[in-house]
Image (cartoon, rainbow, N blue to C red):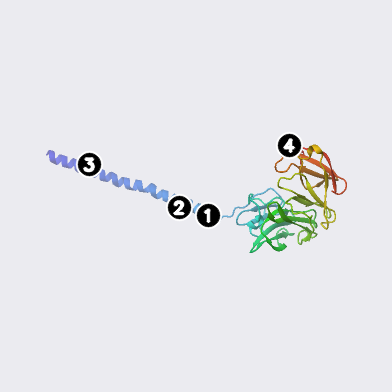
């Protein structure tokens, strides 16, 4: 009788165990199935998000947005974005190591009425420089070759601006070897649709800055590697000829203010700031010397030191 009881007990225990296992199997498989479904849903959502275009946001009347795949501009504070028909990478061709999420300073003009962008294209023997412009808010674009010389292995310095609806300048340099390079100055009288090459100073030093303040008067500053004195050239005939400007740096500032910036007009006064160069340490290296000219930029007289918070 004991054997029968023991046998029955054993069978009951086995039966209960099998029943518990059968109940547990769907319970353990259900979470695994749910997890797979959740994972599939997440993958599908991610793919949908990647396919949906990201619309840029801006509070500026005219602005741009750039990434590896496209270059967009808006002329109506982001309500509509228009693709500029060039490869985004061409906007950074040359000796540039900064962020490619923002355009190079002074390499473009963008207003509610027009846009002009400087870019360069690699060729088999160098690069060619171009602009692309629009005067109808992106409805049409005009590509203009600036230089058809393809022996330029790099593009280093670049700056451009339009002073009014018609006149503007474009300055760039290339073919750098150590502390020398070739410089190029172009002017436009049709708002950037075409450009004319003009003369440059007789020097091969590295360009530190350049620009025009009106249709005839322009400046080029030289010396970027350990400059020991400001080296500024001026033209008063739209680049036909250039003259070395005479900057009267006081003796006590002779080794301090060594690099000329681009002059500008303030309250009808022609103003020049001379900074301390890349290695300046006078009062933190940010103080500049201010000079004024009364003869169209040919000579400059020292006026005062300019603190950083006084700079425009």
Structural crowding at the residue carrying mark 1, measured as other residues with C-alpha within 10 Å and reported as few (<14), some (14–19) or many (≥20) = few
Asked whether, in this view, residue 29 is left or right of residue 66, the answer is: left
Dot in front, 2 or 3: 2
Q: Earlier in the sequence, mark 1 or mark 3?
A: 3
Q: CA distance from mark 4 to mark 3?
A: 92 Å
Q: CA distance from mark 1 to mark 3?
A: 53 Å
Q: Which residue is mark 4?
A: 282
Q: Which residue is mark 1?
A: 48
Q: Which residue is mark 3?
A: 13
Report the front residue among 258 and 264: 258
Instruction: Residue 217: give x, y in percent of width and height.
Output: 83, 53
> For numbered disc 2, what is the local secondary structure?
helix
Q: CA distance from mark 2 to mark 1?
A: 12 Å
Q: Earlier in the sequence, mark 1 or mark 4?
A: 1
In this orientation, does residue 140 appear?
no
Which residue is found at the position 79% from the left and 37% from the top?
Answer: 252
Q: CA distance from mark 1 to mark 4?
A: 57 Å
Q: Which residue is mark 2?
A: 40
Dot in front, 1 or 4: 4
Asked whether, in this view, residue 235 is left or right of residue 85, the answer is: right
Asked whether, in this view, residue 26 is left or right of residue 167, the answer is: left
Quarter of the picture containing the N terminus is: top left
Report the front residue among 167 and 52: 167
Q: Earlier in the sequence, mark 2 or mark 3?
A: 3
Q: Earlier in the sequence, mark 2 or mark 1?
A: 2
Quarter of the picture containing the C terminus is: top right
Which residue is found at the position 55% from the left and 56% from the top?
Answer: 51
Q: Earlier in the sequence, mark 2 or mark 4?
A: 2
Which image quadrant for residue 276? Answer: top right
């Amino acid at each position: 009788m004991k054997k029968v009881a023991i046998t029955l007990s054993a069978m009951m225990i086995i039966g209960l165990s099998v029943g518990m296992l059968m109940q547990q199997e769907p319970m353990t498989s259900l979470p695994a199935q749910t997890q797979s479904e959740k994972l599939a849903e997440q993958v599908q959502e991610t793919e949908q998000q990647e396919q949906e275009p990201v619309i840029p946001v801006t509070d500026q009347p005219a602005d741009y947005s750039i990434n590896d795949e496209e270059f967009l501009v808006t002329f109506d504070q982001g309500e509509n974005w228009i693709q500029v028909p060039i490869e985004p990478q061409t906007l950074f061709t040359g000796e540039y190591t900064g962020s490619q999420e923002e355009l190079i300073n002074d390499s473009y003009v963008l207003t509610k009425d027009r846009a002009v962008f400087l870019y360069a294209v690699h060729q088999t023997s160098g690069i060619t420089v171009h602009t692309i412009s629009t005067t109808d808010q992106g409805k049409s674009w005009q590509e203009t070759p600036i230089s058809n010389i393809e022996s330029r292995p790099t593009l280093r310095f670049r700056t451009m601006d339009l002073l009014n609806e018609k006149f503007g300048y474009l300055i760039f340099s290339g073919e750098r070897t150590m502390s020398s390079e070739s410089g190029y100055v172009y002017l436009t009288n049709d708002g950037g649709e075409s450009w004319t090459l003009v003369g440059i100073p007789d020097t091969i030093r590295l360009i530190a800055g350049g620009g025009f303040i009106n249709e005839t008067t322009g400046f080029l500053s030289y010396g970027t590697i350990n400059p020991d004195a400001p080296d500024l050239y001026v033209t008063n005939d739209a680049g036909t000829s250039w003259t070395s400007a005479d900057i009267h740096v006081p003796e006590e500032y002779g080794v301090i203010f060594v690099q000329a910036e681009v002059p500008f007009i303030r309250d009808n006064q022609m103003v020049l700031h001379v900074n301390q160069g890349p290695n300046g340490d006078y009062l933190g290296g940010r103080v500049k010397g201010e000079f004024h000219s009364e003869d169209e930029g040919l000579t400059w007289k020292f006026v005062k030191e300019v603190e950083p918070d006084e700079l425009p």
